[in-house]
Image: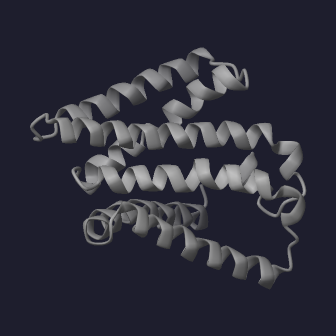
Amino acid sequence: MKIKDGGSLFLLSVLWGGSFLFIRIAAPVLGPVVLMTMRVLIAGAALLLVVLATRNHLELRQRWRHYLVIGIINSAIPFTLIAAAELHLTAGLAAILNATTPLFGAVIAAIWIKEALTIPKVIGLMLGLLGVGVLVGWSPFPLTIELGLSIAASLAAAACYGFGASIQRSMRGVLAHSPWRHVAS
């Protein structure tokens, strides 16, 4: 791995990991729905500026339904579920639960788009599930209904990301000319 790639990976991990802390602080103040609406609107405005600056054509009139589905499944629903969950979870536990995303992604891809679940993938899934279980199982939280519902909401958010990845793969032809096509692969 090149130093530039390592730096980019570190920056992404700080941004993604930091978002859980920000959500944990802001969700009780603003509420999950308002907070995530603001997050999506700010991100949308930033993406619009990038599109305008790079003069990319998103073909919104033809593809708005596809973008809407991906936006709902990959942003609106999981962001709101995570923010609601973080009303009762720590940012660290929420981040750990979000780490189940690849597990859901692999299982959903195997079922929906018939992607092969090879032995190395199954071993990786089992190790990942075991790792998440160990980390979550060692938490000092008393098991309450609120905690259980919050964990379920976090896992549902991770499942949404898994569905989103399969939806994007099934839309490859649709998004082939999009400047965001790298997201669909």
| Quadrant housing residue 112 | top right
- Which residue does the image show at 57% across and 73% down from the upper left? 41
- Which residue does the image show at 34% across and 44% down from the upper left? 96
Task: Please say whether residue 14 is visible from this viewpoint.
Answer: no
The quadrant of the picture occupied by the N terminus is bottom right
Where residue 158 appears, as percent x and y from the top left, is: 47, 41
User: In terms of depth relative to the viewer, which is nearer, 13 or 3?
Assistant: 13
- Disc tally is 0
State left or right for residue 94 relative to residue 37.
left
- Which residue does the image show at 49% across and 19% down from the upper left? 123
The quadrant of the picture occupied by the C terminus is top right
State left or right for residue 17 relative to residue 60.
left
| Quadrant housing residue 47 | bottom right
State left or right for residue 134 relative to residue 105.
left
118 lies above or below 158: above
- Which residue does the image show at 73% across and 26% down from the upper left? 113
Where residue 118 appears, as percent x and y from the top left, is: 63, 17
Where residue 134 appears, as percent x and y from the top left, is: 25, 30
56 lies above or below 33: below
Task: Please say whether residue 168 is visible from this viewpoint.
Answer: yes
